[in-house]
Amino acid sequence: IRLIGRITISEATAGTWATAPTEVALAPFEKAAVVALYESNAAQSINNGSLTIMDFEDKVYDSHAAVTVGASWKFTVPTGFAGKYLVTSRVAFVANATGYREMQIYKNGANYAYWDFGPALVAGTLGSMNSTEILHLQEADYIDIRVEQGSGGALAMTGGATAIRVSITRLGD
């Protein structure tokens, strides 16, 4: 006998198998990929000197419904999917030549890495920041992206969905 496939079904009620499969795999039984891509077309306002969680509110795809959107935006590792994750983010501030801009990644509510830090750019130029990190995450770990700016007043994010996005992909164990 040769096993060439597997179907996983979660029971809603003990002894019943009337629910749809939660996972279908062919040998060698690789786990389904965990992939999330979110964007923002909102002009989120970032207060001066205030580290703020980015709200990537527009879902492009989220294979495991692992993202919570809103003011406390976060990606939470789904049950059974601990491993290495590739996280890439891009944000853009409106043009402003004063102060500084920074982007950080947080893991479980604590700073994991200062991703990007720099001075404001020449007046009339968007302040775009891009960063990539590989993190080892356990089940239920969560991450979020935070930004800060020091222009002397509130400063909006800009550029639309293609300029403000986050991509999270499980690479493996």
Image: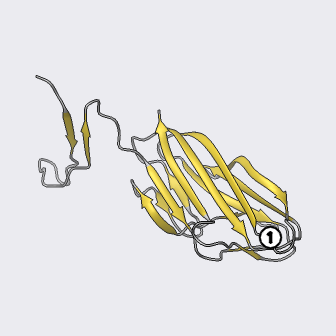
Q: Residue at x 64, y 47 (%)?
A: 132
Report the side of 35 relative to 52 (left or right).
left
Report the side of 73 relative to 62 (left or right).
right
Secondary structure at badge 1 equals loop
Rendering coords of residue 49 (x, y %): 82, 67
Sort mark 1 into few (<14), some (14-19) or many (20+) by Cα contacts within 10 Å.
few
Rendering coords of residue 3 (x, y %): 17, 28
* 134 relative to 125, above or below: above
Report the side of 80 relative to 157 (left or right).
left
Q: Residue at x 72, y 58 (%)?
A: 129
* Residue occupied by mark 1: 125
Q: Amino acid at mark 1?
A: Thr
Q: Residue at x 50, y 40 (%)?
A: 138
Quarter of the picture holding the N terminus: top left
* 160 relative to 89, above or below: below
* 3 relative to 54, above or below: above
